[in-house]
Amino acid sequence: NIAFGLKMKNLSTKIICEKVLNSLELTRMSGFEKRKINELSGGQKQRVAMARAVVNDPTVLLLDEPLGALDLQLRIQMQTELRRLHKSLANTFVFVTHDQGEAMAMSDRIAVMHNGEILQVGTPHEIYEKPKTKLAAQESGILSRISGILGGFG
C-alpha cells in the first residue's frame, strides 16, 4: 500500500524498502508492515495514508479534511501526530478544514475563504484578533450576532 507510488516510479526494491521503512517509522507504524488495511484501527489507517503520502518526499502535502471522519478523541490524537510529523519533515502542509478550532490549533498561517475567494491570510492570532472584514470574522467563527433592543434603565 505505502510502496505503490514508489513502484510506479520504477525505483529499485532496495530504495523502496528503505523509503517505506523510514515512512513507517515517521508515522509510528513500524511493526505493522505486514498487516492488511482491515486489520488496522481508524487512527492507524490515517497514519498509513500519511505514510503513503510522505514516502514520496513531497515539498508540499495537501491534506483535505484529513480528520473529518474521526471521532473527537482520535481527532485530537491525530492533530498531535500531524503537528509532530510536520515538524520532523519541515515541508509545507496545506491543511483544508471547515473546523475553525482545528484550523486555529493546527496552523502557522491561515487563509480564510468564502465561495472560493480568499478573504484574509494571517497567523491564527491575526485572524482571531484582527479580522479584516465582517465576513472574514464570520467565516472564522469569531463573529456572532445578537439582535435586540438597547434600552435605558430607570
Image (cartoon, grey):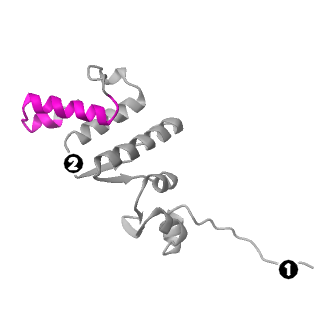
The quarter of the image holding the N terminus is top left
| Residue 27 pos. (x, y %) | 33, 35
- Magenta segment includes 22: yes
From where the camera sits, is residue 2 visible?
A: no
Q: Does residue 133 lie above or below 100 as drawn?
A: below
| Residue 149 pos. (x, y %) | 77, 75
**Which of the 4 image quadrants contains residue 40?**
top left
Along the horizontal axis of the image, is 147 left or right of 98?
A: right
Along the horizontal axis of the image, is 151 left or right of 31?
A: right
Q: Which residues are magenta?
A: 5-29
| Residue 84 pos. (x, y %) | 38, 44
Q: Residue at x 9, y 39 (%)?
A: 9
Q: Does residue 34 lie above or below 48 as drawn?
A: above
Residue at which label 1 appears: 152
**Which of the 4 image quadrants contains residue 118?**
bottom left
**Which of the 4 image quadrants contains residue 147?**
bottom right
Task: Identify the residue at the far right of this view.
Answer: 154
Nearest-to-viewer mark from 2 and 1: 2
Q: Residues within 10 Å of mark 1 (few under 14, many from 20)?
A: few
The disc label shown at residue 58, or none:
2
Q: Residues within 10 Å of mark 2 (few under 14, many from 20)?
A: few
Query: What amino acid is at disc 1?
Result: Gly
Q: Indicate which disc, 2 or 1, sits on the residue closer to the N terminus.
A: 2
